[in-house]
Image: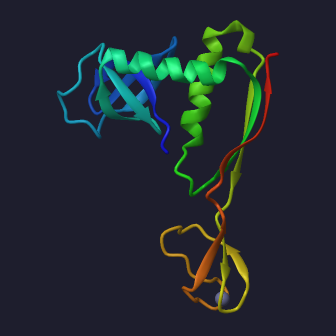
Amino acid sequence: MCVGVPMQITEINYPAGVAEAKGVKRDIGLQLMPEGSLDIGDHVIVHVGFAIEKIDRALADEIWKSLDEILRVINAVKLKIGNMSGIVTDSLIFAFDAVKLEHSLLSDARIVIEEILTVYECSNCNSSFEVDNIYFPTCSNCESLNVTLISGEEQHIENVEMEV
Ligand SMILES: [Zn+2]
């Protein structure tokens, strides 16, 4: 699951641009979109600071409606996100902050994200180790490739404080 945020283009200086959502402006990269394919006023999905897809206004509104629904009642949320889960915490925090601007009841809400390191255990020598290279994990002790993922795929909500 990848979290992108719908934003509206307000400035284009290809390959850079500015986009806005909920009154929040952000510099974004446009280099993943063909030059000339976007106009001011277009809606795009922004993912880790890059426009990745052009969408129509209706879809942008629909996505924000879902985000609003999810975030509306939240006072505080603590998430555990494994760094292999595919969730980009930057996008989550931005969406959360943008929704907060619109809902005064949410102004004190906090989001706390605990990123979980990717840890493997080696079946050969039984040592466990953290890895940066999540695609080709090898045991840091004996260099065996016979390893098992212990943590790093988490994507769960630890706890949420909600309006009652
Ligand atoms: Zn080993």
Instruction: Point out the residue furthest to the front here.
Output: 164
Horizontal side of residue 38 vs 154, given as left or right: left
* Quadrant assignment for ligand 1: bottom right
**Which residue is rendered at x = 70% and y = 7% of the image?**
104
Residue 134 in percent (x, y) is at: 53, 67
The answer to whether residue 19 shows anywhere in this view is: no
Q: Quadrant of the C terminus?
A: top right
**Which residue is rendered at x = 42% and y = 21% of the image?**
7
**Which residue is rendered at x = 19% and y = 28% of the image?**
37
Residue 157 in percent (x, y) is at: 71, 41
Residue 79 in percent (x, y) is at: 71, 41
Colour scheme of this structure image?
rainbow
Horizontal side of residue 160 vs 136, given as left or right: right
Question: In which quarter of the view is residue 75 placed?
Answer: top right
Question: In which quarter of the view is residue 151 placed?
Answer: bottom right
- The answer to which of 161 and 6 lies nearer the viewer is 161
Question: In which quarter of the view is residue 40 placed?
Answer: top left
- The answer to which of 163 and 117 lies nearer the viewer is 163
- The answer to which of 102 and 40 lies nearer the viewer is 102
Q: Is residue 8 above or below residue 77?
A: above
Q: Is residue 91 above or below residue 42?
A: below
Residue 95 in percent (x, y) is at: 56, 26
Number of numbered discs overlaid on the protein picture: 0
The answer to whether residue 129 shows anywhere in this view is: yes
- The answer to which of 73 and 114 lies nearer the viewer is 73
**Which residue is rendered at x = 65% and y = 16% of the image?**
100
